[in-house]
Image (cartoon, rainbow, N blue to C red):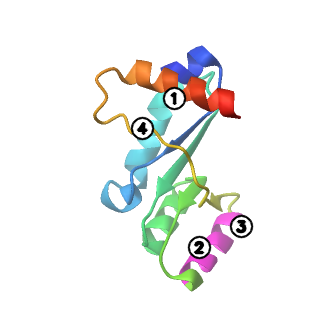
Amino acid sequence: MAAAASLRVPLTLLSGPGAGVHAGPGWFAAIIRLAEAEHPSVAVTAILDCADQPGRALAALRMGTPVLRLGGNRKARARVAAIAEARGARLDDAGYRTLDLAACEDPRAASTAFLQESKKSS
């Protein structure tokens, strides 16, 4: 978020695979709220991955999560997509170039380099 703020670029934050199942939508929402409070100038799209668990996706929608990922059964996915749309939310399956900061020695420098490269290619 700090790198995006300094570069004045929007940011898409994609949870880890299945985070909506393992950690839950409340955890993800709390992290996003903290990040947005610390860097209010950054336009953020936060996407919670609910693996193949439509029940977790529905719970996330009830909590107000605006963008979700959901795999698995096509019929269940279509039903959840319709519910999401009715709530002003959406399912997302776009491919993103991603940066995993878990093993970075200098996350700020890695984020800045990543975002600068992304800015050049857009």
Q: Earlier in the sequence, mark 1 or mark 2?
A: 2
Number of the label disc, if any, that sits on residue 86 = 3
Q: Give residue 119's quadrant in the image.
A: top right
> CA–CA distance between discs 4 and 1?
21 Å
Query: Sequence order check: which comes first, mark 2 or mark 4?
Result: 4
**What residue lies at 57% left-to-right and 76% top-to-bottom?**
77
Give, as a three-letter code, the residue at label 3. Ala
Crowdedness near tag 3: few (<14), some (14–19) or many (≥20) residues, C-alpha within 10 Å = few
Q: Secondary structure at mark 4?
A: helix
How far across and down, in percent of the image, does residue 75 sit? 58, 85
Q: Residue at x 61, y 52 (%)?
A: 66
The amino acid on which the numbered mark 2 sits, given as a three-letter code, is: Val
Q: What's the residue type where badge 4 is placed? A: Ile
Q: Residues in magenta?
A: 76-86
Work out whether 100 lies above or below 74.
Answer: above
Residue pushed farthest bottom?
75
- Residues under labels 3 and 4: Cα distance? 25 Å
Spatial CA distance of label 2 from label 4 is: 24 Å
Disc 3 vs disc 2: which is toward the camera? 2
Residue tagged by mark 1? 114
Q: Residue at x 51, y 20 (%)?
A: 3
What's the residue type where badge 1 is placed? Phe
Q: Secondary structure at mark 3?
A: helix
Horizontal and vertical percent for residue 2? 50, 19
Lower position in the chain sequence, tag 4 or tag 1: 4
> Dot 1, how many residues are within 10 Å of its Cα: few (below 14), some (14-19), or many (20+)?
some
- On screen, residue 12 versus residue 34, left or right, reads right
Labels 3 and 1 touching (C-beta < 8 A): no
Q: Which residue lies under the disc numbered 2?
A: 80
Q: CA distance from mark 3 to mark 1?
A: 35 Å
For this view, does 122 lie left or right of residue 63? Answer: right
